[in-house]
Amino acid sequence: MGTLYAILGGFMDQIILQILNGLDKGSAYALIALGLTLIFGTLGVVNFAHGALFMLGAFCAITFNRILTISHVVVDETQKDFLGNPLKVDIPYIYDWFGESTGQALINWSVPLAILFAIPVMIIIGVVMERGLIKHFYKRPHADQILVTFGLAIVLQEIVKYYFGANQIPNPAPEAFTGSFDFGAAVGLKAGSIIYPYWRIVYFSFAMLLIGSVFAFLQFTTFGMVVRAGMADRETVELLGINIDKRFTIMFGVAAAVAGLAGVMYTPINSPNYHMGMDFLVISFVVVVVGGMGSLPGAVAAGLLLGILESFASMRQVIEALPGINQVVIYLAAIVILLTRPRGLMGRKGVMEE
Amino acid sequence: MTKTKLTRRSVMQTGAVAGAGLALPTILTAGSHAGFANAPTGSTVTLGFNVPQSGPYADEGNDELKAYKLAVEHLNGEGDGGMLQTFSSKALDGTGILGKKVEYVTGDTQTNADAARASARSMIEKDGAIMITGGSSSGVAVAVQSLCQDAGIIFMAGLTHSNDTTGKDKKANGFRHFFNSYMTGAALAPILADRYGADRKAYHLTADYNWGYTTEEAVRNSTEALGWETVAAVKTPLSQTDFSSYVAPVLNSGADVLILNHYGGNMVNSLTSAVEFGLRAAQANGKNFEIVVPLYSRLMAKGAGKNVAGIFGTTGWHWSLENTAGSRYTGTNAFVKSFGEKYGYPPSQAAHTCYCQALLYADAVQRGGSFNPCSVVEALEGFEFDGMGNGPTLYRAEDHQCIKDVLVVRGKENPANDFDLLELVDITPAEAVTFDPAIFGGNLGSCNPGA
């Protein structure tokens, strides 16, 4: 009995650990899928460039960090560079303006601060994308929309690669959030049995907050009410004399900002490169379909669910029992869910079924 | 029926005659030269640099290409001559190769075997490249090497670390200057046992492809031989970006060392996750928990930032080698100087191995007196040289693998800049990493001059 409890206890740790792991990965999926669903629900466009928006968000954080560290060169005669010439030291202008300690603090906190920078930038990118390109494709078949947005995603990737290179660029979290939290000790299990990085807790909380704000915005503001009405019955809303197009454009901007913020906060978890959007894109579509096309709560629920499933599937014991399961679990789950619930978890009748 | 008679038969006949007519000049030239593919006839000779210019290893490719351009300059007698000043063979004199000015064409491997074969083929068939070199992946190296074998062209591999390139997939026309997984294991294990003790339990995370397998096997075998125990080895998908679910269970697995058989983006991400989950600061089995990255690349260490601090691995060459380890590694400073002055930063190991490969090829042609692949093979097989930054080196005849010292390095705790990320811990001499070429199987076959 004692041994059984010990085995179960040991296993329990791992299960809790993988649920936690799944939650932060899942919250990134959920944020991207939420934006996708917003765009699909309002504009009826299948936006394959949404992963690229996530990636652009991450590069907003990198750019913001670079802006903070714009430097002038001071030649330091006391040190030598790799060729034996006097070392050129870069001093960020921000040190000159705010003093060295404030300057360092600003650079240290550049990831959270980048949120303020990314919101306007991402809304502008979203609105420009919608007005400049995507609006011309509303009346076209979904296949055309997919092709044009996919093409756009590749163009955006190549632009980013041109300016930032192909390798990953590290962008660490503020020092206050480095290290990890002993979750095991906190919930009364063995100390050190469940270690969880602080920044991932921050990421999960941030994602929940962001999702909550989007829902609150749609639920409790007049603007949100009109948008929801427009999603349900666009023609009637237009007949009431409301310019629904303008509001939908703004929603595209909001969706871009949500994906962008997901990207900004993700940079300390994985150093971003130009390709990160594509890595998330396919899974995000699976998330949207599993959650139910057009269903916002469905997107969030499916994002978290698939994130957790993916974590479980990468446990050593699971891989040993079912080799290769870690590579296919998401798609397997999608097949099972779609076979049993053809409209996805929370899909409504009539969406994408004309 | 007075119209022109265009029957199947007449079309075939015209086609056959025209085809023969077009083929005639090629047949004549093929007969007139020394009897090998793409024999240079004018005053120039064309080399084909096949490097990743797009895709995930584009930055390595960029460094490789810069190194090749520098090599071409030095071969043609421009610039300061770089390693030609220190190279032990003095056959090259700065007048090109066999008096022919060196020109080059480039291809984009995209780190994709099909794309790499297509670009190599195009350089061979369209541009008349006499030799193909470069690349940053073992999958690509093996694919391009076999294409070059069939086409009768010499292949000088770039950055490829899998045992297979000069092991089971070796070819007579292919040569590798870079070291391999086996040498990594042999060099790293003694240092690990020395620093971390012989009583260690290792947990491997391994990239799920060819290079990952050979590296895991090599490191496992060498560490187990010294008394380590392998607790688990988990394969991770190559496309994985967030390794948290693989890294998180490690601490409670009974292991006290995590070995990351990952390269490139995989390495950056898995290492970042491991440090994030507090493994570097953790204790296990009463010891400090340790992380090991068998193959280090400075360009990639940059992506992992501060997370590389204190982590052991191996590397083929490092720009500070001659300053820290002495004149045995002569050539290093000469190369760093020409590269650094031209491009403003120190070269990577990818740049170094590619630069060496270009010079070694040119030297072999010069010494053999012919561009004929069979003459190059003969000149390179068993060739012993020095002054190229790795100390005395042998191009082994049995498998066309360079046998040279391997560097064991560690991530610096306080790097002064983006280039100063690794510090030299030890150098394992060539004798200690030499292996029996027969253990990996494969067959060189015989050299193919093409044509």
Image (cartoon, coloured by chain):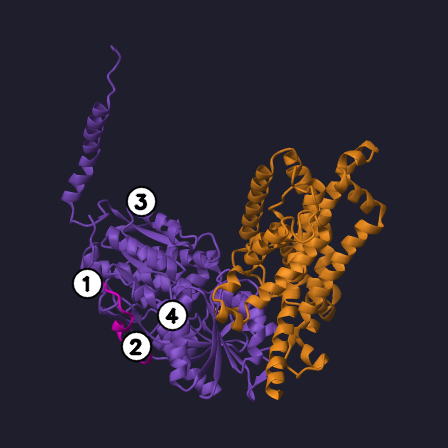
Chain colours: A orange, B purple
Left of B43 or right of it: where is B214?
A: right
Can marks 4 and 2 be said to lie on one chain?
yes
Instruction: Report whether residue A95 is seen.
Output: no
Cα distance, mark 3 to mark 2?
38 Å
Q: Tell me the tag on residue A37.
A: none
Residue type at numbered disc 1: Glu
* Circle 2: element type: loop
Which residue is located at x 28 percent, y 54 percent?
A: B148
> Does B440 appear in magenta?
yes
Which residue is located at x 31 percent, y 61 percent?
A: B359
Please state the horizontal and vertical placement of residue B312, each as a whole percent of the image.
48, 77
The earlier-in-sequence mark between 3 and 1 is 3
Q: Residue furthest top?
A: B2
Cα distance, mark 4 to mark 2?
16 Å
Range covered by the magenta-colored residues:
B432-445
Please state the horizontal and vertical placement of residue A141, each as a whole percent of the image.
60, 35
Please state the horizontal and vertical placement of residue A225, each as a whole percent of the image.
82, 45
The answer to which image quadrant residue B434 occupies is: bottom left
> Does A61 appear in magenta?
no
Left of A318 or right of it: where is A106?
A: right
- Depth-wise, is mark 3 or mark 2 nearer the camera? 2
The earlier-in-sequence mark between 4 and 3 is 3
* Circle 4: element type: helix
Instruction: Report whether residue A156 is seen.
Output: yes
Q: Is residue B26 above or below residue B389?
A: above
Q: Name the residue under label 2.
A: B434
Cα distance, mark 1 to mark 4?
29 Å
